[in-house]
Image (cartoon, rainbow, N blue to C red):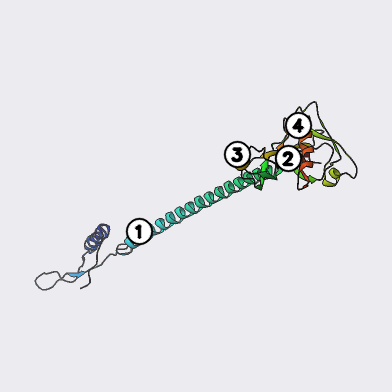
Amino acid sequence: MMRVSLSSSQILSLFCIVLLCHVATCFVIKKSPLLPGGRVPRIITTRTITPRNLPPLFDSGVNDQQQQARILQEKADQLRREIESFEDSKREQKRKYNEEQQAILKEKQDIRERYSAQVPILKSDGSVVMERCDFPPRLVSSKENNEKKKQSRIITVQANLPLGIVLGQREDMSGFTTVDEVAQGSNGELAGVKVGDLLRACTATQVTMEMPTWQLMAGGIGRPKTTRMMFSTDGVSFETVMEALVSNSMDPEGRPAWLVLERMDE
């Protein structure tokens, strides 16, 4: 036997239908000629009134479930759209953050490259290693006629002695040596030195007495040893800078002098 499960609303609707059908049945008595004995025959007819506009018994629950399912589906779709929008917003924020960080990193790298140079550095064990050294900017230009403010940069040149340049120190920049003149066709001009360059560092040689243990025990004075190193000229007197440059002539290997210059952009 097939069992049908009805909800309370469906059972109530069924009860109302049965009650209405019971009440709607009327008896119609039609008169006819008297029968023998004065008895009146009764002719009974029935008329069933079918109730109208009543909700269907089995379709109501199904429609309610379908409507609830549609509502839940719409809410699920709306929630999914909100989640996708939130994820898109997070991805966009992350993309912008990464772009900003990359821009900041690139700017720092550009500044580092602009104000640094690779120069030979003498190590404690006597070896020479090329390393990038920073030189904070010293030259500053002011804006004129609403033009973009010019910047300086660090460059390195190698030139043989004699350099053929004239150095000096400006009154407004005490302790900083500048290039005042460059002789035409000189080693300095061929290396790329220009008037107005600010000398930030140069190579310098130093002669020391190397004293092995056996010489000390024998009372010897040792033997001379020449070493070359980078010499910072910032805040150094003009005479000391000139001595450092001239000392490159004592390099036993006859290597060209290194000059670290700061130059304004054209």
Mark 3 or 1, which is nearer the eye? 3
Q: What element carries label 2?
A: strand
Q: Disc 4 vs disc 3: Cβ atoms closer than 8 Å?
A: no
Q: Which residue is drawn at 76% across and 36% down?
A: 244
Please report whichever mark, 1 or 4, sits nearer to the chain's N-terminal start. 1
Q: Residue at x 10, y 73 (%)?
A: 36
Task: Give the residue at the far right of this rendering.
Answer: 184
Q: Nearer the viewer, residue 112 or 210?
A: 210
Mark 1 or 4, which is nearer the eye? 4
Q: Residues within 10 Å of mark 3 (few under 14, many from 20)?
A: few
In the image, what residue type sits under mark 1? Asp
Alpha carbon of mark 4 to alpha carbon of mark 3: how far? Answer: 36 Å
Q: Residues within 10 Å of mark 4 (few under 14, many from 20)?
A: few
In the image, what residue type sits under mark 4? Thr
Q: Please state if 112 lies on the left or on the right of 98 as rendered.
A: right
What residue is disc 4 on?
240
Please report whichever mark, 2 or 4, sits nearer to the chain's N-terminal start. 2
Residue 64: assigned label: 1
Please report whichever mark, 3 or 1, sits nearer to the chain's N-terminal start. 1
In the image, what residue type sits under mark 3? Met
Q: Residues within 10 Å of mark 1 (few under 14, many from 20)?
A: few
